[in-house]
Image (tube, helix red, strand yellow):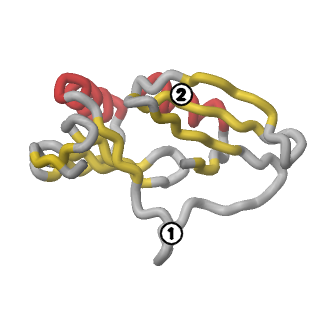
Amino acid sequence: MALISSDVERTIKFYQELLEFPLTEIIENRDYKGSSHFFFDIGNGNLLAFFDFPGLDLGPYQEVLGGLHHIAISVDPATWERLRGKLEMAGVPHQIESGASIYFKDPDGARLELLADHLGEMYGARVL
């Protein structure tokens, strides 16, 4: 999964410092000079990638029919509780559903979900 970042430093601060997903690499985007391509380790052997496109006015994130609805990321229950507290302390608007999902938006408006279940489970039921 690759998303667009309008501000690399802000995106790194949000994903690495607030959500505790380590930045693993940042390289120049080979397809657009001056653009960065960077990655966060979101656990379970998965990375979340970003591009920035300085100089292009791409506008704000928009949820559209047939487009990205949200990104669900599984974290263990202790991490979920800790991150919920960090989101609250940072004043990030969020919604909790079923006592195990937190929905919120990143700085560019992409919707995220932190799910307090192991990968392959949803609300305690095996889905994989």
Distance, label 1 to label 2, CA atoms, is 26 Å
**Label 2, on which residue?**
13
11 or 69, nearer to the observer? 69
The amino acid at mark 1 is Gly
From the top left corner, tell me how far across and down residue 97 is, in percent: 16, 52
97, above or below 7, in the image: below
In the rendered structure, find residue 77 and report the number of the disc placed on it: none
Tell me which residue sits at (15%, 43%) in the image. Answer: 100
From the top left corner, tell me how far across and down residue 104 is, in percent: 35, 48
**Label 1, on which residue?**
67
Give the left or right position of residue 4, taking residue 57 as reference: left
The amino acid at mark 2 is Lys
Tell me which residue sits at (46%, 45%) in the image. Answer: 106
Tell me which residue sits at (66%, 62%) in the image. Answer: 59
8 or 127, nearer to the observer? 127
Find residue 10 and report its image quarter: top right
58, above or below 105, in the image: below
Q: Residue at the far bottom: name it.
A: 65
28 or 34, nearer to the observer? 28
Tell me which residue sits at (35%, 48%) in the image. Answer: 72
